[in-house]
Amino acid sequence: MDSLEEQRAGLDRGDVSARELVQRALSRAEGVGAELNAVVGVRGEAALAEADASDARRGQGTVLSPLDGTPVLLKDNIVMQGEPTTCASRILEGFRSPYDATVVERLRDAGAIIIGRTNMDEFAMGSSTENSIFGPARNPWDPSRSCGGSSGGSASAVAAGVTGYALGSDTGGSVRQPGSFCGVVGMKPTYGRISRYGLVAFASSLDQIGPFTRTARECAWVLEALSGHDPRDSTSLPEPAWRGSPDLDGSLSGIRIGVPREYFVGEGLSAEVSERVRASLGELEAAGAYLVEVDLPHTEHVVSTYYLIATAEASSNLARYDGARYGRRAVGVEDVDEMYRRSRSEGFGPEVKRRILLGTYVLSAGYFEAYYKKAQQVRTLVRRDFDRAFERCDVIAGPTYPQVAFPIGGKVDDPIRLYLGDVYTVSANLAGLPGLSLPCGEASGLPVGLQLMAPALDEGTLLTVASGFQKETDHHLHRPGSFDEPE
Amino acid sequence: MGRISRKDVERTAELARIDLSESEVEGLTRDLDRILEHAQQLAMLETEGIEPTAHALPLPTPTRPDRPASPMDPERALGNAPLREGSAFVVPKVLDGEEG
């Protein structure tokens, strides 16, 4: 009983209690979750008390939502009052949040039970969950390989059956790419769909919270619980909560699926991923969808555009870590300037320093026009590419990542090579579009992700296509062999 | 090489308030040069007259009535202070000169 659908059905039938589900999740978090280094902290007592409250509620005939009584994990950059949040960084060691993120409130209102926190790349900067004070998180399909990143711990934990779902954050692919590596569904909703209040900021114009689940239907339930306007986030869309899960009939008939020419020509795309994704497009076509070739002519420029904008925003957002009000303060400092310098130098890891410096450089006098402003203009061109493509199709499909999960330690010394892997995911962030990765089979025994993107606010079509694909195929039922659920 | 020098990296680190070791300066000069070399391809794109995008989905700045709300309990707000005194955060001296 490791998927959210099974857990919900078990609770509805009375076969299992919320307490039993939470106990099982806690024991798996401390077992396989710790073995994979996916879970970095649990809350046991409080979670069990919430489970008992859920069971009592259900006993009296009240069920708050499809999530009521089910255990969930949060990426360690989403704050919860009184609990630690580290962003996998030394600079936030010991920090405990004085308030709840909006998504925490909404999970609680839906009856979900937060059982702990997951590993990530420091401040969500990375694609492998290796840039972490906790050490690398591992992939349940092959523990010598990366689970992707930056929300790798959440993806790994769901794939290993610790919880049926988990939250991550996606600034340039940080939910979709680990979803692809671990063989689970990972969604980045439309920018502004889910409140960012209480999500530690990396790049504010790109960041979006998103769920990991096994099925599209489960993803829809989580989106229903989390979405909807929040006055505490000034970029929250003035839209009511998304309520489309009853409409997901899984019918693909007549849906036009755009296949970007540029996504299959790059030298970075591995033959086995290309083959698997093309086979999946064939499966969609066989189920009644039309394939349409589309063009996204600025594809070769999206990675540079993304890294210039994301690092510029990060350099500004991370200026708040100065040792004054919270977080690490260096000891034995003489004056305030030394406090800033030493606290930051000792507190940030190498990738975070690299990105802060790049961002500071592109914003500095003399370079602003050539790099930052230029990137913002190209961002406009990227948005126009998608506007034009969506005149001819309902969703765009292609690979989530050019390769299957790479070995831990295999890539981190070459930032450019790692950055270029983000070519398929960063566009949805630059253009603010919803994107989703879903498992579409394996290559060399490792999961491959199929990415779908839709126009802004059209999560309905995105999830319809995903649920249709899962109705026609059984890729989402494949499990990593070594982590089968024990009886 | 040549887009960014060691001196540029040192000056930028100064702006970002991050102290770097010799080997960090060397590594970052190499990394940033490679990243900026790759970003150079954007210069080839014609963007004359193209509006820059700051936010993908442009929204008007939301406003709310200017009414006081209840503040966070100062004890909670100060809970993470590395050093505090009463309801204040304590930092080392900010200005040179005589103790006030």
Image (spheres, coloured by chain):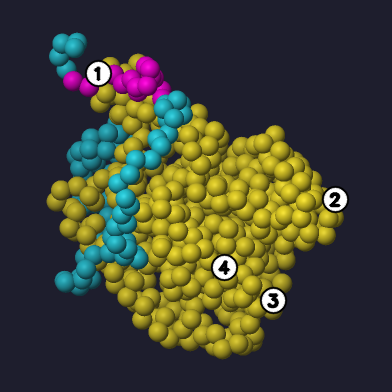
Chain colours: A yellow, B cyan
- Three-letter amino acid code of the residue under disc 2: Glu
Is disc 4 surrounded by few (<14), some (14 to 19) or many (20+) residues within 10 Å?
Answer: some
The chain identifier of the residue carrying mark 2 reads A
Q: Nearer the viewer, residue A264 or A199?
A: A199
Q: Residue at x 34, y 47 (%)?
A: A314
Judge if badges 3 and 2 mark residues of a common chain: yes
- Three-letter amino acid code of the residue under disc 1: Lys
Q: Earlier in the sequence, mark 4 or mark 2?
A: 4
Q: Residue at x 36, y 78 (%)?
A: A387
Q: Residue at x 63, y 60 (%)?
A: A213
Judge if badges 3 and 4 mark residues of a common chain: yes
- Three-letter amino acid code of the residue under disc 4: Arg
Mark 1–mark 4 contact, CB under 8 Å? Answer: no
Instruction: Check disc 1 and report the residue beneath it.
Output: B93
* Residue A99 position within the rendered picture, expressed as x and y whole percent measured from the top left: 49, 38
Give residue A243's mark. 4
Residue A44 inside the magenta-drawn segment? no
Instruction: Check disc 3 and report the residue beneath it.
Output: A471
Residue A139 as seen in the image, left or right of residue A5: left
Q: Nearer the viewer, mark 3 or mark 4?
A: 4
C-alpha span from label 1 to label 3: 65 Å
Q: Which SS class for mark 4?
A: loop
Q: Which SS class for mark 2?
A: loop
The chain identifier of the residue carrying mark 4 reads A
C-alpha span from label 1 to label 4: 54 Å
Is disc 3 surrounded by few (<14), some (14 to 19) or many (20+) residues within 10 Å?
Answer: some
Q: Which secondary structure class fits the magenta region best?
A: loop
The chain identifier of the residue carrying mark 3 reads A
Judge if badges 1 and 3 mark residues of a common chain: no
